[in-house]
Image (cartoon, rainbow, N blue to C red):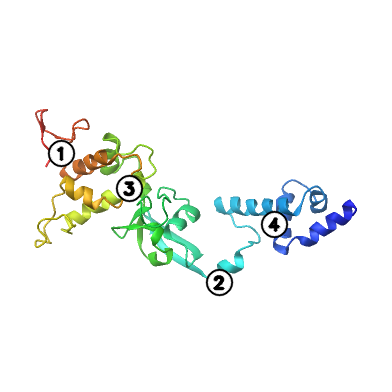
Amino acid sequence: MSDDSKTDTLIEELTLDESAILDEILSEFGESRRRFIGQTSTAILSALVLEFIAKRNALGGTPAVSLGSAAAEENAVTVALRVNGLAKNVTVDSRVTLLDALRERLAITGPKKGCDHGQCGACTVIVDGRRVLSCLTLTAQCEGKEVTTVEGLASGNTLHPMQTAFVKHDGFQCGFCTPGQICSAVALMQEAKNGEVSYVTNDVVQKTRSIQLTDEEIKERMSGNLCRCGAYQNIVAAIREVHSGRPVDPMTGRFESSTGGQHETV
């Protein structure tokens, strides 16, 4: 088979979508489709087209023709929500999770995809003041809601007190679980303030009373957030300091007195 015949065969094997996108790619380099195809193969062409689509989507662009447009339109929903104080409208497949929408559509990469099964807590975000596992929450469920990720906790250049405490007490090592840990810690502070009991709460009758977070309470309430580096004691110390409003010595884990001495933790 001649080179021209091979080229004609390759051109015929391209779908209309692939041909349109390939022309868009080559137009940036002043290359003709026939000349380019004559020097390549169908497999390489398909891979190039798919890579181009992925990069355009990652940058927020929309290719002229999307190979998955038909499937996407079939289940598409447009969700209006607020993310870290900003109004957002995102059109996604009705089955897309909040985690994927945040990371892949809104470029908010604080929430991490760890297990993707709701078991590690790395994807924890705050929705309307409640901590949720974003890998198990559909984007469509968040219509009209306020979503806060670790990026939205700080006020300008001023860190949230919980973020500052995590830095002080070295509550992270590799940092992968840290966004979920901090969001969970911030939300549990409000839970305790509301008097919401946990499995280890002794007095479950006075539900309207703010609950004092002991180390045992903190560990129980944070048990859904796993740390592969094992920085649990540091995390507990950070949360205890913010909750109590009293400085905790990073070396001993004990409260510091106003005179410089130390008291045992409660």
- Residue kind at label 1, given as amino acid type: Arg
- Residue kind at label 3, given as amino acid type: Leu
How far is disc 3 from disc 4 in space, using C-alphas?
A: 43 Å
Label 3 Cα crowd, 10 Å radius (few <14 / some 14-19 / many 20+): some
Residue to which mark 4 is pinned: 21
How far is disc 2 from disc 4 in space, using C-alphas?
A: 22 Å
Residue to which mark 1 is pinned: 246
Residue 139 occupies which quadrant of the picture?
A: bottom left
Q: Residue at x 9, y 63 (%)?
A: 205
Q: Nearer the viewer, residue 2 or 99?
A: 2
Residue to which mark 3 is pinned: 226
Say what secondary structure mark 4 lies in.
helix
Q: Nearer the viewer, mark 3 or mark 4?
A: 3
Q: Tell me which label, 3 or 1, sits earlier in the chain.
A: 3
Residue to which mark 2 is pinned: 74
Say what secondary structure mark 1 lies in.
loop
Given contact means CB atoms under 8 Å apart, are the residues at marks 2 and 4 in contact?
A: no
Given contact means CB atoms under 8 Å apart, are the residues at marks 2 and 3 in contact?
A: no
Q: Residue at x 22, y 48 (%)?
A: 219
